[in-house]
Image: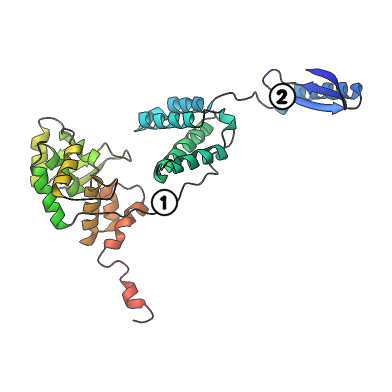
Amino acid sequence: MAIKKVPDGWQADVQPGGRGHKRYRKTFRRKADAERWENALKAKVAAEPEFSLPQKDTRKLSDLVKLWFDLHGVSLKSAADTYRRLIALCEAVDDPFASRFSAQVFADYRAKRLKAAISASTLNRERSYLAGVFGELKRLGHWKGENPLSRVRPIKISQPELTFLTVEQIQQLLASLKESKNPDVYLVAVLALSTGARWSEAEGLKRQNVRVSPGLVTFSNTKSGKNRSVPIRDDLANSLASRLEQGGFERCYYAFRFAMIRAGIELPEGQLAHVLRHTFASYFVIKGGNILTLQRILGHSSLIVTMRYAHLAPDHLEEARKLNPLS
């Protein structure tokens, strides 16, 4: 702290809260005025400690990510992958001081990624992950500022076409699966087609999750973390129980990919094994299944997601035919 002569008069340079706290500078015509202001400021801070701003936050963005991971992220299902993505993001924006990270910094980063042909869904996930870091640390009392991502809107993405297999394609696929050298790929695919399970859920099924007569499977390692049970045919339940008595399924995702190629079935990008889930859901609705029941079977936390299949119902918006002005 000092009072020094400057061209315009006398400048008081004061740091009343101590090192690392806010500095105050003000210029006066007379040295006596500068001294009085300095003394008044010191008295103000002594009487009201909150008047002096807290010590400057020197944590880097990556420091916040590490703190978030230790306090919360480590408990998430995809903890390691999420942490890796967040650290890579920090490095891509030159790991600034967290207090200087802003919506504009992320917007600039996102614009560069879009030019590099990174998908909008990937960028939306990155935004969601990082917003979650600030939000969770704020709830835990480890971040006092605003969430800089709260003012960054996700990129609007057109709903992708949900492809499902025709009856002929299903038969071609099953025949191709039987030719596979992998002993489990056929059974895993049939299970997914019969229940709408995600590939990872079907592939990770354990013997204790299968009930025989009446047939029932319970998926426990789900995306939402909630268990769900789905009835299945007794013959399928018997096959599953018999196979799983010997241990878990072998990994067979790539065997499924090759079976699809052999069957000559082409799908939109990103819809390989998930087509089995879409196929189950689509035929469930086409055959008159209830959309609320489908939500429970698929394990969707929101009905909005399940409503993607509603247009396949035989009576979907049938009123349009009966109630239009020309009917």
Identify the residue at the far bottom of this view.
Answer: 326
Q: Give the residue type at disc 2.
A: Pro
- Residue at x 22% of width, y 61% of height: 286
In space, the residues marked 2 and 1 are separated at their CA atoms by: 49 Å
2 or 1: tag closer to the N-terminus = 2
**At which x and y percent is residue 53?**
69, 27
The quarter of the displayed image where residue 43 is located: top right
**At which x and y percent is residue 159?**
37, 54
The quarter of the displayed image where residue 144 is located: top right
Quadrant where the image shows the C terminus: bottom left
322 displayed left or right of 31: left
Q: State whether residue 213 appears in this view.
A: no
Q: Mark 2 or mark 1, which is nearer to you?
A: 1
- What mark, if any, has residue 80 been given in the picture? none
93 displayed left or right of 312: right
- Eyeballing the image, is 49 above or below 301? above
- Eyeballing the image, is 135 above or below 15? below
146 displayed left or right of 186: right
- Residue at x 32% of width, y 77% of height: 322
204 displayed left or right of 38: left
**At which x and y percent is residue 61?**
52, 28
Query: Mark 2 packing: few (<14 Cα in 10 Å), some, or many (20+)?
Result: few
Q: Which of the two residues, 262 or 81, is positioned nearer the viewer here?
A: 262
- The residue that disc 1 covers is 157
Q: Give the residue type at disc 1.
A: Ile
Q: Secondary structure at mark 1?
A: loop
- What mark, if any, has residue 49 been given in the picture? 2
Query: Mark 1 packing: few (<14 Cα in 10 Å), some, or many (20+)?
Result: few
Determine contact: label 2, label 1, CB under 8 Å. Answer: no
- Eyeballing the image, is 72 above or below 313? above
